[in-house]
Image (tube, grey):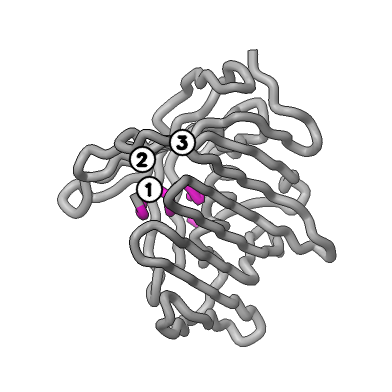
């Protein structure tokens, strides 16, 4: 379940994102874990906080767990540049806290992960576990069919791969929306975990659904309740 909540932070090639293409959004979701007789809520938002700095926030809560993830970033020469990354999880197994600083002048990533020091070289194209999801959202909007991201994961940089599966209609509380379906690509000999995401085609490819199936068959879902994109309320048919 910890991994499922992490992917909901939810919730995702080097990102080519024009600053003018970034639009503020906010969305709320239901969060359901099929093996538990309870539901939770999740919220995700992007807003400009001044001087070209954007803040991407995700928060999720269930009766037994809470999770918060905040990234700050800028855009330079069509590339996303993370500035800070802060993650905190409580009430679900072991608590976890991650704080990272991306110093583009010294080209270094420094911080801590679960109390352990992190020090890595910083190159253009490296993203944190939150900003890569924004890059994925915009790469899908740009029509890409396969995507690959270099993501700071613990004390190393890992590669996250995705592919577009097609288009589906997703029925949400905001109505039916046409969405592009995207799958995380994993080596089946290394992991049988399945992660699928749906992005609303008419709403700047806002995340409207996420499904995570663990190796033991346990399933976690988030589904859009309501949202706004660039000040306009999301409405389906």
Can residue 162 be seen at all in this image of the molecule?
yes
Position in image of residue 122 (x %, y %): 53, 77
User: Callout 1: 10 Å neighbours few (<14), some, many (20+)?
Assistant: many
**Magenta-drawn segment:** 2-14
Give the residue displayed 53% in from the left and 82% down from the top. Answer: 110
Whether tag 1 and tag 2 are in contact, CB under 8 A, the answer is yes
Q: Which mark is residue 212?
A: 2
* Residue 148 to residue 180: above or below: below
- Which residue is at the front of the view, 144 or 6? 6
Residues at marks 3 and 2, CA–CA distance in whole angstroms: 15 Å
Q: Which mark is residue 4?
A: 1
Give the residue displayed 75% in from the left and 28% down from the top. Answer: 233
Which mark is first along the chain, 2 or 1? 1
Residues at marks 1 and 3, CA–CA distance in whole angstroms: 14 Å
Residue where numbered disc 3 is placed: 39
Question: Does 5 lie within the magenta span?
Answer: yes
- Which residue is at the front of the view, 129 or 79? 129
């Amino acid at each position: 379940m910890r991994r499922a909540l992490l992917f909901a932070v939810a919730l995702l090639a080097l990102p080519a994102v024009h600053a003018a293409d970034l639009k503020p959004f906010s969305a709320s979701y239901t969060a359901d874990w099929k093996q538990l007789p309870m539901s939770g809520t999740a919220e995700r938002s992007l807003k400009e906080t001044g001087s070209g700095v954007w803040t991407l926030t995700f928060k999720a809560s269930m009766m037994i767990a809470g999770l918060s993830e905040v990234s700050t970033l800028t855009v330079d020469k069509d590339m996303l540049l993370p500035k800070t990354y802060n993650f905190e999880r409580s009430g679900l197994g072991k608590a976890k806290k991650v704080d990272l600083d991306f110093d583009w002048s010294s080209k270094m990533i420094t911080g801590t992960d679960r109390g352990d020091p992190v020090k890595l070289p910083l190159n253009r194209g490296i993203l944190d576990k939150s900003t890569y999801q924004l890059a994925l959202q915009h790469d899908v909007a740009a029509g890409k069919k396969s995507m690959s991201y270099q993501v700071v994961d613990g004390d190393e940089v890992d590669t996250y791969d995705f592919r577009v599966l097609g288009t589906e209609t997703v029925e949400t509380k905001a109505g039916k929306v046409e969405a592009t379906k995207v799958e995380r690509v994993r080596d089946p000999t290394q992991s049988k975990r399945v992660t699928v995401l749906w992005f609303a085609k008419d709403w700047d490819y806002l995340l409207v659904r996420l499904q995570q199936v663990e190796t033991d068959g346990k399933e976690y879902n988030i589904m859009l309740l309501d949202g706004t994109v660039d000040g306009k309320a999301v409405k389906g048919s």
